[in-house]
Amino acid sequence: MKKRRSIVHTLSVMLVVTSLSFVQTGPAHAAAEPNQVTNVTVSQADGFTTVAWTPVDGATDYQIERTAVDAADTPTATPAIVGVWRPNRQVNNGSPTFADAGFNPGDRFGWRVRARIGTAEQPYSTPVFGTTLPPPGDPGIPGQNLRTPWETTQAAQFTSDVDEFAYTAAVDRLSDRVRVVEIGRTVQGRPINMFVIGLPAPAATPDAVAKTSPLAINCNVHGNEPSDREACLIMARQLAFGTDARTLDLLRNTTVLIIPSINGDGRAANTRGNSTGQDLNRDYSLIRQPETAAYVRMLRDYRPVAGYDGHEFSNNQAGDLPMLPPRHQNVAQSIFDESLDMIENHMYVQGAKAGWWPCPYGCQNGGPVGLSEETILRNTLGLKNTVNSLLELRSAGGPTRPDEGNAANNRRRKTFSALWTFNSFLDFHRAKLVDIRAARTTAIRFQSGNTGRIVFRGSRIIPAHPAPHPGEAPPPADQPGPDQILDNAPCAYKLTDKQYNGGRTDGPGGIGTTVAQRIADHGWKVVQVADGVLVPLAQPERGLIPLLLDGQAAEPWVSGERVFPTLTGPQPGPLTVDGFACLSAATVNGGVTVRPGGTLIATGSTIGGPLTADSAAGVFLGNTQVRGTVQVGRTAGPVSLIGSPLLVQVTLAGNIEGGAPYLAGNSIAGTLSCTGNVPAPIDLEVTNKVIGAKTGQCVAF
């Protein structure tokens, strides 16, 4: 799809509006009356018009008026005030803009702006005319000419599930850039589809897609909040068939994952929850429902580095686009910081240019929202080391959009504001991918080192900016109490066989998947022991594991046994591990040998000689220096070496149980050899620094 030029038409003469006509009165660029707004311009984008003007000294706010006109700019309808601009809409309120989006794309209008000083209305500006852009996609080109029922009915109806499936299949059939995959099924059996979009074609496997640093957009978790879903269907078409330089550049450098509706049953019934009544956005960590389990498996397999989660918000005092980063205090600082940067230094700034009003979720009397529940997707994503944000579309027009009594106007504004947000998210990902990757690398290394306290519930602070500012009213602090903090983190959790494999009643119809299945869906590594399993914290999702396995947590699956470190501080060497050893901040004066059936977990430690493990039950290193060779072979369980300085050569050979060995973010001063491992080792897209030669399965590391 070729990039369309914005249509801006500024009259050379001043016009004053009556209810039915424009009357010529003087130059457009000069104020004929005191406090009259000047230099009004309009620029067109997909589904909205950005109105900009020069501010009036002392103005309290501004009213934006729109009038439908014909090709000769003669009014064809009564003028309507469609917007109220307030100083807290944007970071640069000295350059006011307003995004007008309540119209049918392709129609022509005139716009005027007037200031108010207190309650006193000042003179209107001269009108500026423009033809809005038609719906995205050339109607004469196959693929580009696809339209959803929401588009063809001018927002009179939403796209049904049957129409979504037909549209999705058509995009898949007509574009080589697209592969549609079914990631799961709803309780009632509806497919949960995902667009996988790349150029010239998406990578062939989930692991190959993961290597492209993909980003994911979740469009419809609450069935009665459908506007983001309509935006996602339009955006999928734009990405599938667009020929403009921006689209091509984006898709050459990443893969875009779009899930139009995880909650197809709720969308069909227009209900918030799924068919069981479960709010799926309170289930992403617990994964009791098949819909959330499907999404979490997708995260495990495709490993998106960034995400957005679409919703609608009933507070009509809020901004157009409330947003929020992952706030749970177990989220790594680097993930929180990069997510907040995306909102405050990208969305706020770009929103000010386009005329949208992003703000923190809960802004302007939002109440106790935006808290730390790990069950909410933005927090689950953060705990999975994914830079991300919530998006809430303000449901009603409210005082700043008084022309949304018409349902179609309201629906168009919500959908096209979501489309703008998701496209801006793509632009942020493209511009800041190096920083996003760095934040994720830092987070995975930090989490795998099992450092610091565990917080069961409690939020990071969202800073309040001095008013007027979009960020002047953040959500509540939501700080943890003493009973929500575990200062002395365990090394692992031990589950009995009954806890791990026993039947559960917390799923649809009173039948739930086992904890074993849920752990596998999350992608955690476990070590089999004689009387149960161990779940080490020395792995990338360390911040999430205690929230589901510790009895002190707010919503745990089970109350697992806390297993604390067995060795700390200076230790004589060499050390032989026959059963279980957990080193935390330990220094071993010599090498470590893990015998068949033994388990070694080492975090923040130093091993003064070689590490040898043959037929071990499991080997985990997190932020642990090894001063001799590392040889791990024929392991009967998981292998995870993350964020560790390994000062000589590393050999992984014949490890065929426990899933793919993790070898991520290490500094290896010697050679790296990987042979006969099934599956092959993976680096989680966290680069290892290897000084020597790389051979076998790790040659690409």
Image (cartoon, grey):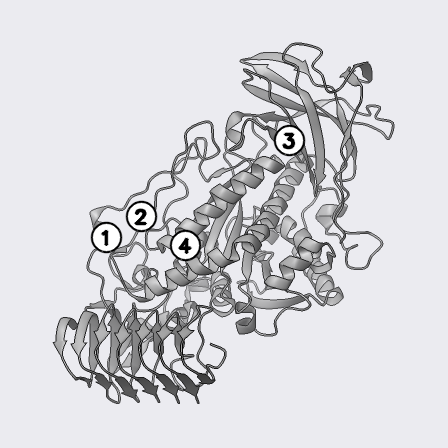
Q: Residues within 10 Å of mark 3 (few under 14, many from 20)?
A: many
**Location of residue 287 in the rendering, given as x and y in whole percent from the top left corner:** 43, 62
Q: Residue at x 62, y 37 (%)?
A: 354
Which callout, 4 or 1, points at the residue further toward the start of the chain?
4
Which callout, 4 or 3, points at the residue further toward the start of the chain?
4
Proximity of marks 4 and 1: CB atoms separated by less than 8 Å: no
Q: Residues within 10 Å of mark 4 (few under 14, many from 20)?
A: many
The answer for how far apart the CA atoms under marks 2 and 4 are is: 16 Å
Which callout, 2 or 3, points at the residue further toward the start of the chain?
3
**Location of residue 322 in the rendering, given as x and y in whole percent from the top left corner:** 50, 40
Residue carrying label 2: 458
Q: Residue furthest right?
A: 72
Residue carrying label 1: 485
Q: Nearer the viewer, residue 534 or 507?
A: 534
Tell me the amino acid under the disc marked 4: Ile
**Location of residue 269 in the rendering, given as x and y in whole percent from the top left corner:** 59, 51
**Location of residue 392 in the rendering, given as x and y in whole percent from the top left corner:** 52, 43
Q: Residue at x 24, y 80 (%)?
A: 531
Residue carrying label 3: 404
Q: Nearer the viewer, residue 606 or 497?
A: 606
Tell me the amino acid under the disc marked 2: Gly
Residue carrying label 4: 335
Q: Is residue 608 above or below residue 379?
A: below
Tell me the amino acid under the disc marked 1: Ile
Label 4: state its secondary structure. Answer: helix
